[in-house]
Image (spheres, helix red, strand yellow):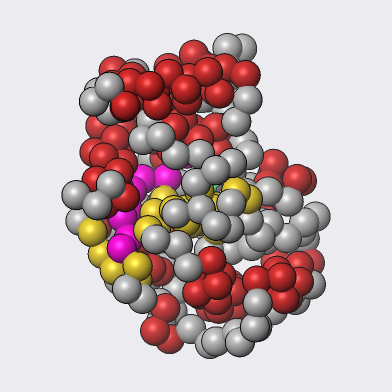
């Protein structure tokens, strides 16, 4: 995080320390928040992933054919080997159109692991997850509860390669890619997981429920506490959901504070 976002993060952190968590985000819509830190950058109207997080409630299709229980396993011994396996992966058709495999960003020793859906155009171009507008909002959401990808957060996606035209991940693509995520979670061993968007939430909870029905509770993925919330791209298009998302972040903070 840098510039305006860095200053905002410091401000939010200060407020939180004063016992006033997430005051700013609750007062502003996600678009207004982005406009504040990135004036002239579209204010949240440019989308990094136009088609995959839609303006309606996420549908109830399963995130993958089987969820975590049914995923084939990858037994790579260490993180570096897993990353190398991912970077040369040809397990599904998405390898054909990718510029970069998007494995992760942030701190592998961070307390929190965020799992998103799939790379968009910016992520495919840079090889880093959540670097478009949705990523900026994600950084602000994390900053509102005193978390940052530089220090405390590790970020990745269910799919490591961009679906063409940012379409939704297909079940066989999730099935092919999920073992990487599964091993990634094992090796990173976060204290807490945050799923953003229905694909990550459904896969990690092994359900097919809509996100609106899933959020607001604490789940467990392989004994790691899991909170689910709306995808930041969905929040940019549906400012009315932001209060619920801020509540989810408070729940996350609560768990991380051991309350
Ligand atoms: N949306 C996601 O789910 N992941 C990214 O990396 C970028 C946008």
Q: Could you tell me residue 208's position as x and y percent?
A: 31, 68
Q: Residue at x 50, y 48 (%)?
A: 153
Q: Position of residue 113 (x, y in %)?
A: 47, 56
Residue displayed at 51% across by 53% down: 110
Q: Is residue 39 visible?
A: yes
Q: How many marks?
A: 0
The quarter of the image holding the N terminus is top right
Residue 202 in the figure: left or right of residue 80: left
Q: Quadrant of residue 56?
A: top left
Asked whether 92 falls inside the magenta stretch, the response is no
Counting from the top left corner in percent of width and height, residue 120 is at 63, 47
Q: Would you say 247 lies left or right of 31 here? A: left
Q: Residue 74: which quarter of the image?
A: bottom right
Which residues are drawn in magenta? Answer: 225-233
Question: Looking at the image, which is closer to me, 18 or 95?
Answer: 18
Residue situated in front as seen by the camera: 204 or 75: 75
* Vertical placement of residue 17 versus 145, above or below: above
- Asked whether 85 or 209 is in front, the reply is 85
Identify the residue at image location x=39%, y=54%: 194
Image: 149 above or below 137: below
In the rendered image, residue 107, in percent from the top left (x then y), is placed at: 58, 51
- Residue at 42%, 45% in the rendered image: 231
Q: Is residue 52 visible?
A: no
Whether residue 133 sits left or right of residue 248 in the image: it is right
Above or below for 41 versus 49: above
């Amino acid at each position: 995080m840098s510039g305006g976002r860095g200053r905002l993060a410091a401000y939010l952190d200060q407020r939180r320390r004063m016992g006033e968590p997430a005051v700013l985000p609750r007062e502003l819509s996600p678009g207004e928040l982005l406009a504040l830190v990135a004036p002239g950058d579209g204010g949240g109207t440019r989308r990094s992933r136009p088609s995959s997080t839609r303006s309606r409630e996420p549908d109830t299709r399963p995130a993958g054919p089987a969820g975590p229980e049914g995923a084939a396993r990858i037994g790579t011994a260490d993180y570096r080997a897993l990353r190398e396996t991912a970077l040369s992966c040809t397990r599904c058709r998405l390898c054909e159109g990718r510029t970069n495999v998007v494995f992760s960003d942030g701190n592998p020793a961070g307390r929190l692991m965020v799992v998103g859906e799939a790379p968009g155009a910016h992520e495919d171009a840079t090889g880093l997850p959540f670097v478009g507008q949705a990523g900026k909002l994600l950084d602000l959401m994390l900053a509102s509860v005193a978390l940052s990808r530089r220090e405390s957060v590790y970020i990745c996606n269910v799919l490591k390669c961009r679906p063409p035209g940012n379409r939704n991940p297909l079940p066989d693509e999730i099935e092919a890619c999920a073992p990487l995520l599964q091993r990634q979670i094992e090796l990173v061993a976060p204290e807490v997981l945050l799923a953003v968007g229905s694909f990550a939430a459904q896969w990690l909870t092994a359900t097919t429920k809509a996100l609106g029905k899933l959020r607001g509770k604490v789940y467990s993925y392989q004994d790691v506490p899991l909170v689910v919330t709306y995808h930041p791209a969905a929040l940019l298009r549906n400012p009315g959901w932001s209060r619920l998302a801020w509540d989810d972040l408070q729940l996350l903070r609560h768990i991380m504070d051991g309350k």
